[in-house]
Amino acid sequence: MISLQNCTHRYSRETVVNLPDIHLENGENLLVTGLSGSGKSTLLHILAGILNPTNGTYEVNGTDVLSLSESVRDRFRGKHIGIVFQQMHLIQSLTVADNIHVARYMAGLHTDQKKVKTLCDTLDIGDKLHGFPDELSQGQKQRVAIARAVVNDPVLLLADEPTSSLDDLRSENVINLLKESAAISGASLIVSTHDSRVKKHFENVLDLENTEQNGVAV
Amino acid sequence: MNLFKLSFSYLRRRALNTLLNILLLSFGIATIVVLLLFSYQLEENLYSNAEGVDAVVGAKGSPIQLILSGIFHIDSPTGNIDLDEAKTLIRNPMVEDAIPMSLGDNYRGHRIVGTTKAYPQRYGAELTEGSLWEHPFDVVLGAGVADLEGLSIGDTIQSSHGFAEEGMTHQDSDMTVVGILDDTGTVLDRLILTGVETMWGIHAPHGAGEEHEDEDHDHADKAEITDTSYLADEHSGEQITALLISYRNPLAAAQFPRFVNDRTSMQAAAPAIEITRLLNLLGVGLDAIRVFAYVLILASVLGIFIALLNSMKERKYDLAIMRSLGGSRMKLFTNVLLEGLMISLAGGVLGIVLGHTAVELIGQSFAEARQFAVTGFVYIPGEAWIIALSAAIGLLSSVVPAIQAYKTDIAYTLSKT
C-alpha cells in the first residue's frame, strides 16, 4: 500500500511545489501526466525515496519512509522500490546479467543467478546476458532496465517517461511489459509521462495540470 | 556481484588507461626496489667480507684503497711492507691474530693471494676436493675460479704479473692445483690461494748464470708450509702486501691504528670506518636515482588521481543509479577507493617483480656486480614497506574522487537528464 499525504516541497524561498495526495492499494496502477515543470519529477523522486519533501508523510506498506535514516532508506528503496529511468542509465562497464545482479547486491540481497536468468528469459533478453549494454538496441536496453527494477520484487514500480522516444507500437509494448512485470511481482505501478498515447492503458490517471494545488509559485 | 568485481569492471572498461597507470607506478617502484636490493646486498657483502677484520695494515696511502685491495681484492694495493717490520706488529700484544696477504700476481685475471691457511678458515671455507697447500707452488682455487676456468686437481697454471689478464707471464712458475674450495658467497670464491712463500718463490731474483735445475726447484718446493713458516728468519728481508689484524680487546681499536700510523712506516685502516665512508660516497649517487624514482611515483599518483576524477564525471549517473538501487554512500566511497587500491597494489607487485628481475639480470650481466654476487632472488624486509607504500598511494590518489562519489546527490543528478 502506497500513501502520500499533504506533501509540499520547497526548492527555494520562491519555488514551492505542492503535491497531490496519492493512495494506492497493492497491485493498483496509476498514470501521472503533466507537462514538464508541473511537478512530475518532484513527485516521482519523492515516491522513489530519493528526495525528502519539506512537509508531509509518505508510507510504503506501513513503513514511514521519510522518518528513516539515509542509509536505512537507501536499503529500503533498494528492496521495495523499483525505478525505470527515462534514460535507462545502465552501467556500461557491466554485462547485462551483472547490471541486474548489481540491483540485488546494492540492496543487500544475495546473488540469485537463476532468478536473473528466468527474469531475462521472460523479458526476451535471455540470450544477451553476457553482452554489454552498448551492444543492445534501445528496446533491449529498456527491457534490461525493467528487469533491474523488478528483480528485487518491489512493492512499488516507478517508471519515468518510459515511452517518450518510442513509436506507437513500441510504446504500447513497453507499457504492457511494465504492467506485466509489476503484476508478476505484485507491485503497484506508477508511470509518469506527458505522452498522451499512454493514457488509454490506465484507469487511474492523475493529471497534475488540472489539480489546483500544483506548481504554485509563492 | 561484489565491490571487488564492480571496481574491476570499471578498471577493465578503461583498460589502456589502467595499464598505463600500473606501468608508470611499477617503474617507480621497480627503481626503488633495485636501489634497495643493490644497497642492501652491497652493504651486506661489504660488511660480511670484512667481518672479524679489525684493521688492515699495509703501505701508506689511501685507506680506502688499502681496504679495497686487502679485503675485497678490487683495487691495486698501496704498495708493499717489509716482513721484518710487519713481524713487530704480529707480535704486538694488542694483536690477537694477523693474516698476511701477498698480492701482485694473477692467473687470467684471478688474483693469486699468498697467505696462510688461517685466511680460508676465517671465512669458514670447506674444501670440495683435495687439500690446502702444503708446499710452495701448491694453489687452492676459489669455487668461482675453478668453475670459470674449468680447472681440477693436478692441473698446472702459470701466474702473470700484476692484476690484469694481459700481464707478463712468469715463466717457470708452474703452480699445481691441490685443492678447490666450496662456494662461500664471499670474495674467496674468485681468488687463488697459496702460501706466502710461493709469492716469494715466483719473484725470487734469478741470478745470472744460476743453474736452474729441476732437481733444485723440486727440492725447494718440498719445504713444508705452516701457518708460521713464513716468519722464519731465512725469509728476513722479504716483503708482503698487507696484514689482516684482529684485536685482542676492543680498547685496541683506539690505540692500535694510532700506533701504526705514528710510529711505523705502515698504515692501519679500519674496515668498518672505511666501508661506511665508501657507502656515504656512493649514497650521493643513489640519492639522485631515488629522487628520480619518487618523481615517477608522484607522476603515477597524479595519473591515478586524474583517471579516477575523469571517471567520476563519466559515471555520475552510474553512481546515482547505484544509490537509487539501495547502495549506501559508504559502498560507493569504498568502490572508488578500491579502484585506486587495485591499481596501486597491482603497480606495487609488478614493480617488485620488475625490480627483482632487473637486479637479477644486472647481476648476471655485469662483471663488477658479479664480484659482489648480486642476485634478484633475495627478499629484504624493506619490501613489506613498498606494499604499504603502494596501498598509501592508492588511497591518496583515490580519496578525493571517492569523496565525490560519497557526495553523489541522486535526485539532483537524475533530474538533470
Image (tube, coloured by chain):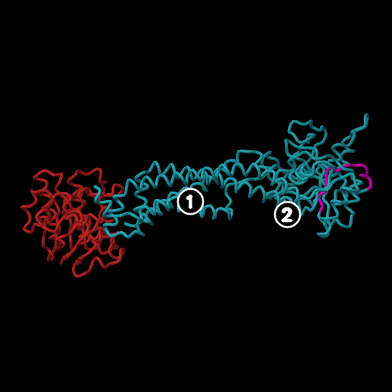
Chain colours: A red, B cyan
**Residue B47 belongs to magenta span:** no
Q: Which mark is residue B231?
A: none
Chain ID at mark 2: B
Chain ID at mark 1: B
Residue behind mark 2 = B124
Question: For this view, does B42 lie left or right of residue B240?
Answer: left
Q: Is residue A152 visible?
A: yes
The type of residue carrying mark 2 is Gly
Which sits earlier in the primary sequence, circle 1 or circle 2? 2
Q: Residue furthest front?
A: A218
Where's residue A87, x and y in %? Answer: 22, 48
The type of residue carrying mark 1 is Ile
Q: What residue is at 48 percent from the left and 47 percent from the top?
A: B350
Over which residues does the magenta segment extend? Answer: B233-245
Name the image quarter holding the N terminus of chain A.
bottom left
**Residue B244 belongs to magenta span:** yes
Q: Nearer the viewer, residue B210 or B311?
A: B311
Residue behind mark 1 = B393
Where's residue B226, x and y in %? Answer: 85, 51
Q: In 3D space, how far apart are the residues under numbered discs 1 and 2 (Cα atoms)? A: 45 Å
Q: Are marks 1 and 2 on the same chain?
A: yes
Where's residue A123, x and y in %? Answer: 16, 52
